[in-house]
Amino acid sequence: GENVEQHPSTLSVQEGDSAVIKCTYSDSASNYFPWYKQELGKRPQLIIDIRSNVGEKKDQRIAVTLNKTAKHFSLHITETQPEDSAVYFCAANTGGFKTIFGAGTRLFVKA
Amino acid sequence: DTAVSQTPKYLVTQMGNDKSIKCEQNLGHDTMYWYKQDSKKFLKIMFSYNNKELIINETVPNRFSPKSPDKAHLNLHINSLELGDSAVYFCASSPLGTGYGYTFGSGTRLTVV
């Protein structure tokens, strides 16, 4: 079955710097890759997603890239702010009824 | 107006008890899920339902029994609770099963003592 690995597990950056979180997946049939942000004590919320027919997608300070050949996808956050501090999850879906999540990255943005 | 609502938000109970968690979505989605988030924040799928039908049972112990009376509701009943069941349980829904982003409920923190 699908396996999603996520790195790093913890990331600490200075406010204004960029943050990059990387994920790899195992099932080449995966075609949908969402990213979720979970603030402390809250629910995970979808922040951006990408489909396998697209290499890159941007939404303001957030961008996601996908390399299907290498089975890698990454989240890039530019000009980080303290409110970006949260746990971020990558995930992969093969088009079926199961989304597999990475283990999460705890991002700390220091003011 | 809450899109995916779960009750209760907190549940503290003794080992061996039976408890239920309820979930309702008003988004008109066809597919609903239960995920378990452990103390290390790992999100693991338990069940997927599509239009009231069980699609995925991810080798969850028989003590866990989901029920979907209609496509807007997915409840979770747990028998004979064990210490290891302590976790946050999230209900979620999506428009189809085909990999659209989930909308999660606010979670139920279950503590078994």
Image (cartoon, grey):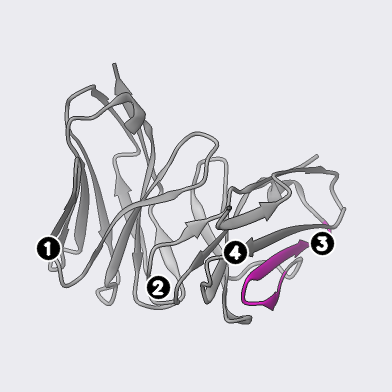
Same chain? Circles 3 and 1? no
What residue span does the magenta drawing correspond to? B66-80
Q: Residue at x 18, y 24 (%)?
A: A16
Place of residue B89 in the rendered image (x, y in percent of width and height, measured from the top left): 62, 52
> For this rendering, which residue is in front, B76 or B9?
B9
Q: Chain of mark 1?
A: A
Query: Are circles 1 and 2 on residues that touch, CB within 8 Å?
Result: no
Quarter of the view holding residue B95: bottom left
- SS of the residue at dot 2? loop
Going from N to C along the chain, the mark reached first, 1 or 2, is 2
Three-letter code for the amino acid on which mark 4 is drawn: Gln
> Crowding at label 2, few (<14), some or many (≥20) Cα neighbours within 10 Å?
few
Query: Are circles 2 and 4 on residues that touch, CB within 8 Å?
Result: no
Quarter of the view holding residue A104: top left
Pointer 3 residue = B79
Q: Chain of mark 3?
A: B
Pointer 1 residue = A55
Of discs 1 and 4, which sits in the foreground? 4
Of discs 2 and 4, which sits in the foreground? 4
Q: Residue at x 80, y 54 (%)?
A: B81
> Crowding at label 3, few (<14), some or many (≥20) Cα neighbours within 10 Å?
some
- Answer with left or right where residue B16 lies relative to residue A15: right
Alpha carbons under labels 3 and 2: distance apart: 29 Å
Q: Residue at x 27, y 27 (%)?
A: A81
> Crowding at label 4, few (<14), some or many (≥20) Cα neighbours within 10 Å?
many
Pointer 2 residue = A1
Pointer 4 residue = B25
Place of residue B100 in the rendered image (x, y in percent of width and height, measured from the top left): 38, 68
